Amino acid sequence: MSYSPDGQYQPPYRPEGQNPPPRPPYGQQQGRPQYAPQGGRPQSPYGQQPPQGGQPYGRPPYGQDQYGYEAPTQQQPRFEQQQYEQQYDRYEPPYEEEPPRRKSKAKKWIIAGVTVLALAGIGAGVMAYFEIPPFTDKGESVSFGKPAGGEGGAAKQAPNSKMSMPTNPTAQFKNASTLPDGTHVAVTELDGKKSGFKGKVWVWAPKEYNDPKFAKSGFPVMIALPGGAGYPINYWMGTDLKLQASISKWYSEGKSKPFILAMPVLNPQPDEPKAIYWDGSDIPGQPKMGTWLTDDVPDLMRENFRTIKSRDGWAFMGSSTGGFSSLKAVLKYPEKFKAAICSGPDIVPDSPLWVGHEKEKAENNPELLAKQLIDKKGAPDVYLAFQVGDNESNKKTLPDVQKFVSTYTKGPIHTSLRVIPGGQHNAKTYVPNMGEGPIEFISKVMEGPVE
């Protein structure tokens, strides 16, 4: 309501410069007669008489009702109310005007729409996080490439071909994650025929693997090993460390081969709370993790991917304990594997499970294996790319690696060492620095893709 400075009521301003007369009593609007409660007489809206006929207002000719008045007829509309409505375009109450209904509805619909979209986005994110279809493709079957030569089967290989077609049986791979370029990290359960150990292996192939241009090509394989327990997951399978994306980037820059990644569990179970680990080795009385890593996992890759026949297409990489296992695998089986990238590695076996098994421990000691390889006539060349941070948690790591490099870089053993300024003992340090030398060092001596 509006008041003048002296407190008197002022009707609201009207654009046409007119104000309507005072509001009729409630119930008399829109042409409806007002009736008094409990049998009272109808009330005049203005308390005055009509201009003719001498009858009280609101009583043009009526039919008689129970009060002695006549009911209004359809032929004679109420005079004053009609005149009032014509003059003032129907009565508007002297209160704050409501916003137009159309605008109000539109605003409500906009708010409702935004709310629904926001809730839908949140819901989709939650369901994707908890891997609820259809908001995630995790768990869907993944097939890596079609046989060269089309659906009808694999093309015949030339006798001198360097590549190896998948030998089968085909494993059942389930999608673990999808990268922005459409490639997949997939996982399978491998029941190792040679080791007797059953565990998970994650795999990834670069986009070039499915490129028709490389349909008859074999690709190099890198077996990537994690640090720590390496169980129940291999942390390289996650895309947050960007190992897969980095390999694609380095290949596009001419630094790296387009490696297929095999990412197996490293240990048969968690190493906590007793800090027991297996060194990626065949320790007597324990699961044969050395055989698992160097026989069963490579066999899985040959069965399911187009690979390279010779050792020129096979490498390891790993950090910490995985770096030790990678170093040991290449030095122990140089006829199978040509290169390794070893980040912040241990140099000697240190599992407490070796106690009482000194002979077997020596057979898995990289220092002794390196010496034997150097002394072996006609031994195949191996390439070992080390990288170590100068801020490693174990202060002996860098000196131990430097000593190994200076002692055993001779004969068939070729090494490189990258010291990472400020580098710490973690994968986030190691992945970016692989592209600053180590990946290029081993890629120069490896093959693939080849036909």
Image (spheres, helix red, strand yellow):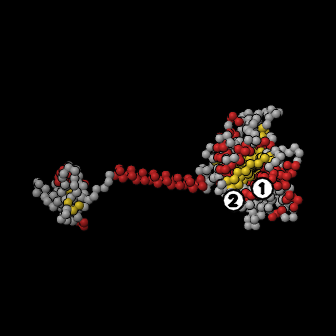
Asked whether the viewer can see residue 289, the reply is no
Which quadrant is the C terminus positioned in?
A: top right
Quarter of the figure with residue 160? top right
Using the image as rendered, state which of residue 151 and residue 434 is in the foreground.
Answer: 434
Residue at the disc numbered 1: 403
Q: Which residue ends up furthest to the front in the rendered image?
A: 406
Inspect the image, locate mark 2, and give the three-letter code of the amino acid beneath it: Glu
Q: Residue at x 73, y 67 (%)?
A: 273
Can you give x and y, in whole percent of width and height, for residue 404 in the image? 78, 54
192 relative position to 90: left or right: right
Q: What's the distance in space between the residues labelled 1 and 2, CA to CA?
A: 16 Å
Q: Residue at x 23, y 64 (%)?
A: 36
Task: Decide: is 123 above or below 41.
Answer: above
Task: Decide: is 147 above or below 196.
Answer: above
Using the image as rendered, state which of residue 360 and residue 219 is in the foreground.
Answer: 360
40 relative position to 256: left or right: left
331 relative position to 15: left or right: right
Asked whether the viewer can see residue 103, the reply is yes
Residue at the disc numbered 2: 392
Inspect the image, locate mark 1, and give the three-letter code of the amino acid beneath it: Lys
Can you give x and y, in whole percent of width and height, for residue 387 in the image? 71, 52
410 relative position to 238: left or right: right
Secondary element under disc 2, as helix, strand or loop, is loop
Q: Residue at x 74, y 35 (%)?
A: 216
Can you give x and y, in whole percent of width and height, for residue 201 in the image? 74, 51
Q: Pick whichever of labels 1 and 2 is earlier in the sequence.
A: 2
Near mark 1 (Cα within 10 A), the count class, few <14, some 14-19 or many ≥20, is few
